[in-house]
């Protein structure tokens, strides 16, 4: 097979040997012909030795001398990639058979595309959809801030985002996006050459994929979610990483929107009081999986959204049926400790909103 049609996979490990091995196994179950390059950012000899024992011998595993950050590690991995198509994959991701070929086919079929991503789920049963990507811009941030300050606008914007999310996750054909997740993103070396580089190494963690998405769009190339390609992203809420997100956001906004008056407006509105949250059922502190009764008229089909934000942007979504809606315990554990919101309804109508707090043991 010609190298031009083959795929190299880059995975960055950081004290996640078991997850990395699981991701690698899912890749080889899908396509034995791919090249896999693992960059170990743990900077720990024992962890690196343990990681190598869990990986097949054909996987190239490179130990970084220090934790150089996610983007820098991917750039290091790119130097070792032999093939034209580059698949960036998080270690906490498992792809479903057929994913690699479907993503590559989408890129080959539409030369206007700069990058593609699979439909992503939070659970092994492929029931809980992860939300579509949201490209962070001053306008996006300002509109979300306004939603928290004025209840009527918050409801309107939240309803719009729910309809949009459903149109994306229920699509049967590739659908163009403003942003796709860097957790499982495929692009070509030709696109990287046009960009000049893969990731901006000023981003240590977070926003490096947002920056990549925006740079691809500035080239006039599209981004697409390919629903026939599927992956599980065992994303886990980790408040300890919030400091990285804050610093990376600052770098991103300074790079792309250095003199935005919308960010000045956002800062002004940030100082205003939050709109009160009304009409919800408080479940208090829970340790067991929450179960919600479903109204008769929703029995044939309901939409469940779960989010750490009462605004529900973004949120995990499940489309189901029946008289009861259950949030499995493994979903609670992935969401982690904190305050969460859930609502049940249809695309255009909400029937009930719930709130709870959960502390991971």
Image: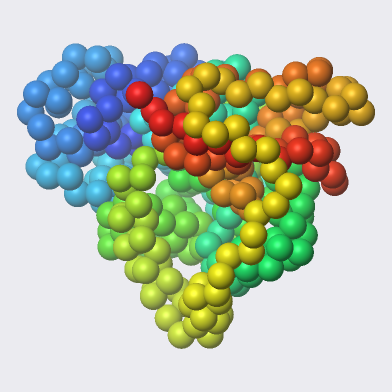
Name which residue lies at 65% across and 54% down.
Answer: 277
Name which residue lies at 43% across and 71% down.
Answer: 253
Task: Specify the quadrant of the image occupied by residue 352.
Answer: top right
Q: Nearer the viewer, residue 15 or 282?
A: 282
102 to the left or right of 67:
right
Q: Nearer the viewer, residue 3 or 105?
A: 105
Relative to 304, say whether 241 is above or below. Answer: below
Count of numbered circles in the view: 0
Name which residue lies at 32% across and 63% down.
Answer: 247
34 to the left or right of 204:
right
Seen as rendered, the residue at the extreme right is: 297
Q: Report the colour scheme.
A: rainbow
Name which residue lies at 16% across and 18% down.
Answer: 50
**Which image quarter is the C terminus in?**
top left
> Residue 2, image x and y in percent?
46, 31
> Residue 109, image x and y in percent?
67, 42
* Residue 198 visible, this orientation: no
Task: Specify the quadrant of the image occupied by residue 11.
Answer: top left
> Residue 126, image x and y in percent?
62, 22
Q: Nearer the viewer, residue 155 or 87?
A: 155
247 to the left or right of 163:
left
* Residue 115 visible, this orientation: yes
> Residue 217, image x and y in percent?
56, 63
Task: Specify the quadrant of the image occupied by residue 58.
Answer: top left
Relative to 322, say whether 115 is above or below. Answer: below
């Amino acid at each position: 097979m010609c190298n031009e049609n083959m795929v190299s996979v880059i995975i960055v490990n950081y004290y996640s040997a078991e997850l990395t091995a699981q991701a690698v196994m899912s890749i080889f179950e899908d396509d034995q012909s791919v090249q896999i390059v693992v960059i170990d950012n743990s900077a720990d000899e024992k962890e690196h030795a343990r990681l190598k024992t869990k990986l097949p011998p054909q996987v190239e595993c490179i130990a970084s001398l220090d934790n150089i950050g996610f983007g820098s590690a991917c750039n290091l991995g790119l130097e070792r990639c032999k093939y034209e198509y580059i698949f960036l994959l998080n270690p906490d991701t498992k792809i479903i058979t057929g994913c690699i070929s479907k993503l590559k086919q989408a890129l080959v079929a539409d030369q206007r595309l700069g990058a593609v991503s699979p439909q992503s789920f939070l659970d092994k049963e492929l029931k809980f959809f992860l939300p579509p990507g949201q490209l962070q811009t001053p306008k996006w941030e300002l509109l979300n801030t306004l939603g928290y300050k004025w209840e009527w606008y918050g409801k309107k914007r939240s309803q719009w985002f729910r309809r949009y999310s459903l149109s994306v996750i229920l699509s049967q054909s590739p659908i163009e996006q403003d942003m796709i997740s860097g957790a499982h993103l495929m692009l070509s070396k030709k696109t990287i050459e046009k960009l000049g580089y893969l990731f901006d190494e000023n981003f240590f963690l977070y926003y490096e994929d947002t920056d990549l998405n925006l740079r691809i769009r500035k080239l006039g190339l599209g981004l697409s979610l390919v629903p026939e390609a599927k992956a599980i992203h065992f994303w886990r809420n980790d408040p300890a990483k919030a400091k990285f997100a804050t610093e990376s956001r600052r770098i991103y906004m300074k790079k792309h929107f250095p003199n935005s008056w919308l960010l000045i407006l956002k800062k002004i509105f940030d100082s205003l009081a939050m709109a009160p949250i009304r009409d919800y059922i408080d479940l208090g502190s829970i340790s067991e999986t929450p179960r919600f009764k479903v109204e008769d008229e929703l029995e044939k089909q309901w939409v469940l959204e779960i989010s750490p934000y009462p605004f529900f942007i973004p949120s995990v979504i499940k489309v189901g049926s029946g008289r009861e809606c259950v949030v499995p315990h493994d979903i609670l554990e992935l969401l982690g400790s904190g305050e969460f919101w859930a609502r049940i309804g249809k695309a255009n109508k909400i029937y009930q909103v719930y709130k709870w707090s959960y502390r991971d043991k």
